[in-house]
Amino acid sequence: LETGESRDYPISVIVSKPISETRISCVNPCAIEKKTATLTCEASGLPSPRYSWFYGSV
């Protein structure tokens, strides 16, 4: 660039967002061994978040 010239540059701003909602959907009893339980995690961001669920000690 020469003195006095300008140029536009595209930029992306990446902001980390907290998880917006966590929810365990169940009725009493909430969880039974060897039965299905539903765990819901809603989050958004750039880049898109990845989810990992762990059971027991990791």
Image: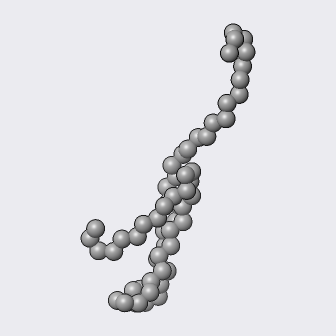
Tell me what residue is drawn at x 48 percent, y 61 percent.
50
Establish if 7 lies above or below 39. Answer: above
Tell me what residue is drawn at x 55 percent, y 52 percent.
47
Between 22 and 34, the one nearer to me in the picture: 34
Q: Quadrant of residue 48?
A: bottom right
Tell me what residue is drawn at x 39 percent, y 86 percent.
31
Tell me what residue is drawn at x 44 percent, y 87 percent.
36
Establish if 15 lies above or below 5. Answer: below
Between 9 and 22, the one nearer to me in the picture: 9
Q: Say whether residue 3 is left or right of residue 17.
A: right
Measured as percent of width and height from the top left, residue 43 is found at 54, 61
Q: Say whether residue 36 is left or right of residue 7.
A: left
Measured as percent of width and height from the top left, residue 13 is found at 58, 40
Name the quarter where the N terminus is drawn. top right
Colouring mode (rainbow / by chain / secondary structure / one colour) = one colour
Q: Say whether residue 33 is left or right of residue 20.
A: left
Establish if 51 lies above or below 9. Answer: below
* Residue found at the far top of this picture: 3
* Residue found at the far left of this picture: 57
Number of numbered callouts drawn = 0
Establish if 36 lies above or below 56. Answer: below
Name the quarter where the C terminus is drawn. bottom left
Measured as percent of width and height from the top left, residue 16 is found at 51, 49
Q: Quadrant of residue 15?
A: top right
Measured as percent of width and height from the top left, residue 33 is found at 34, 89
